[in-house]
Image: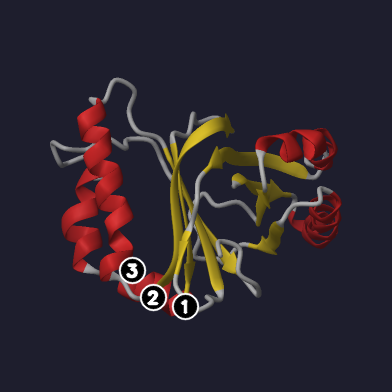
Amino acid sequence: MYSVTRLVDVSPDQRDRLLAALRGAAAATGARRWLVEFTDPGSRNGGDILVQLVFDDEAHWRSAAAQFTAALADPAVTRVNGATYTGTPTATERTGTVFRALLLRVTPGTHPDTVARFEAELAAMPRYVDTILAWQLSRVIESVGTTAWTHVFTQEFTDVDGLMGPYLMHPIHWAVVDRWFDPECPEVIVRDRVCHSFCRCDTAILS
């Protein structure tokens, strides 16, 4: 699959209009699956609107990219962060109600073995957190925004409580994974601000 994530900041008085416009643009791409929703207030650096598009391949996205990108050129759009990437999601038999996208940047020059350990620990999280019902960890092909994102971790959760509680507060998160993000830890490799964005998801995006 070829995926496109966009986190869109918009002028407050234009939120509803932009949501409708981006939903129309997403539908026009012919994506296999797509999601365009207002982000939850608990998002951090996550934009006002989360866009997730999933295509069969890169060629399909390229054929629709110009038209979709034109919708983001609206004067009411104040900032866009995002990435394009490939990967195959892993999913359980259950369907979640919350979609979450994490954009992050590993510090340039980090040793490949260290990056591999970091990726393995992130990918292991669903084994310990049963509120994660689908997930995909990918390296970024093309980055959008002021930060050169290197990785995208997308997930579907049971609900908001399953994200904010069992996931963020689980020992695998704060005792293992957080050391890669903590500036006071010698193993830190993610020094830039991340994009932690989530929204309602009425249909499966990753499965």
Picture layout, residue 57 above or below residue 53:
above
The three-letter code of the residue at mark 1 reads Thr
Crowd rating for badge 2 (residues with CA inside 10 Å; few <14, some 14–19, many 20+): many
Q: Which x, y percent locates residue 69?
A: 78, 37
Residue behind mark 3 = 167
Circle 1 sits in a helix, a strand or a loop, which is it? loop
Q: Which x, y percent locates residue 64?
A: 81, 39
121 lies left or right of 68: left
Residue behind mark 2 = 131
* Picture quadrant of residue 135: bottom left
From this viewpoint, which residue is outermost toward the left?
Answer: 186
Residue behind mark 1 = 158
Residue 175 in view (yes/no) = yes
Asked whether disc 1 touches disc 2, contact meaning CB atoms under 8 Å apart, the reply is yes
Q: Residue at x 44, y 72 (%)?
A: 92
Query: Which residue is more in the foreground, 191 or 113?
Result: 113
* Picture quadrant of residue 18: bottom right
Q: Nearer the viewer, mark 1 or mark 3?
A: 1
Picture layout, residue 138 above or below residue 12:
above
The three-letter code of the residue at mark 2 reads Thr
Q: Earlier in the sequence, mark 1 or mark 2?
A: 2
Circle 3 sits in a helix, a strand or a loop, which is it? helix
